[in-house]
Structure formats: structure tokens, C-alpha cells
Amino acid sequence: MTLLVGETRQRSTVHSFVHRYELDTSRPTFGSACRDLARRALLPAVLWWLVMVGTGLLIVGPLHDLPAETGVDRWFEARRTAGLGSLTLVLSDFGQTQFVIAACLLVVAVFWWRTRQWWLAVVPAIAIGLQAVLFFTSSLLVGRGRPDVALLDDSPPTTAFPSGHTSASAALYVSLALLCQRITRPWLRWGLTAVCLLVPFAVATARLYRGMHHPTDVLVGLVNGVLCALLAWWYLRRDV
């Protein structure tokens, strides 16, 4: 009996989180939304940033750049083909800055137009903005070099840790997956949700294949993007 009650409460909590903007559709003031953003998203993001930077400095410092990861990078390098090169180039572009920004602006505009709920429409923009600041500043502080393999892409000005492509794609597509929960047709809702959640993993694999990151770079980038998407979804107080 106790186990069933616990499972019911857990399902209720998840449902309340995922559908919080449907359970409470009240319009916030701009000022209250900004205050909620600072308290519920920016402050937790700073705490995560400290963890991320600490992890990066640990890797490039006492852990000597995790030399065992070189074996993974060379495993991907040894399996390169022309076809996989073309495929991973396309997949990598799903996390490219210009593509993510353009897709985000399109989603925000369309969702705002369709729902007239600006406080919900801006969630993907908040997620991408948060991850971008956290990724860029941590990258500058950690300063990890690229893997010791042939690089298939031009090296961007940022360093390897964490993966910006993976972080940006996770922030965008996890946000879209949460927005997809408003779709009433189950097959369409679950289909689009699955695609959105698979894209960041595809981007992460593509970045490893192309020699641009170590495994921990894409792993931390993935966590950064997912956490920023969840914080963005949580940023506004709702009565659920």
C-alpha cells in the first residue's frame, strides 16, 4: 500500500512538472516573471556552473586530461568513412550556433502567435541563453585542448570542455520535447518527443566522431543543456 502511494505521488509530481503551464494558465506580470527567473533559474544555474567549472579544472589539472579518453577518440577516428563523415556533418549542424538560434526564434515566434502565452513561449530562449552563458564562461576558464586526432571541422575559438554543440542541442530539443506534451494526439506527441530527445545524443556522437571533443566534454555538455532546459521550464511559479 505504501509503495503504491509513493508511486502515485511520484507520477503526480512528474505530471505537475510537465503540465505546469496547462494547469495554471494565469498571465504573470513582466516584473514577477523576471524575479522568478532570477530566483528559480539563474541562481541554481550559478551553482551548477561552479560544479561544471570545478569538474573541468579537475580534469585538466589533477586528472592530467584523462589520458584514457584518447582511446575512445581514436576508436572513432579509426572507423571514419566518407558516408559517416557526411552524416555526422549534418548531425553536428543540428547543434551549430546559427541553426539553434534560428530554430529557437522560429519556435518562440510560432508558439507565441498560436498561444498568446509569452511567458511559456520564451522557455526555449531562456534555456538556450542559460546554457550559452554557462558553456562559454566555463570553456574560457577550463581551457581544455581538442583531442589528439585529426579534426574534421575547423576548431572554433572556444575550447573543448564542455561541448557547445551538445549543450545547445540538448537545451533546445529538451525544451521542445516539453512543449510537445501539449499535443493531444498520442502517436504524434510521443513520436515528436522521442525525436527531440534523441537529437542531442546524435549530436554528441557526431562531435566525438569528428574528433572535436573528448567523451567527458560531450557528457558535461549534455548535462548542461538538459539542466538549463529543466530550469527554464521551472523558472515561473505556477499553482499546480
Image: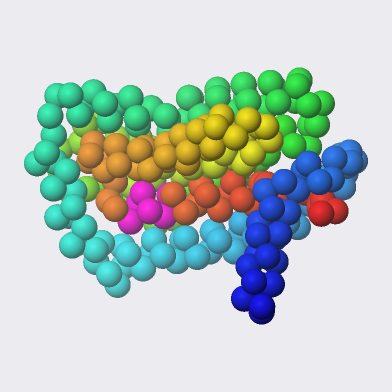
Figure quadrant of residue 129: top right
The front one of 2 and 174 is 2
Q: Horizontal and vertical percent for residue 184?
A: 67, 32
The front one of 1 and 134 is 1
Q: Is residue 52 rendered magenta in the image?
A: no
How is the model colour-coded?
Answer: rainbow
Q: Horizontal and vertical percent for residue 39?
A: 75, 57
| Residue furthest front in the image | 1
In the rendered structure, which segment of residues is drawn in magenta?
A: 216-221
Q: Horizontal and vertical percent for residue 149?
A: 15, 43
Residue 159 vs residue 30: left or right?
left
Can residue 159 be seen here? The reply is: no
Figure quadrant of residue 216: bottom left
Examine the rendered structure and indicate whether residue 176 appears above or below residue 135: above
Marker count (numbered):
0
- Residue at the location (76% across, 20% down)? 113
| Residue furthest left in the image | 78
Image quadrant holding the C terminus, namely bottom right
Image quadrant holding the N terminus, namely bottom right
The front one of 115 and 147 is 115
- Residue at the location (38% across, 27% down)? 93
Examine the rendered structure and indicate whether residue 125 appears above or below residue 46: above
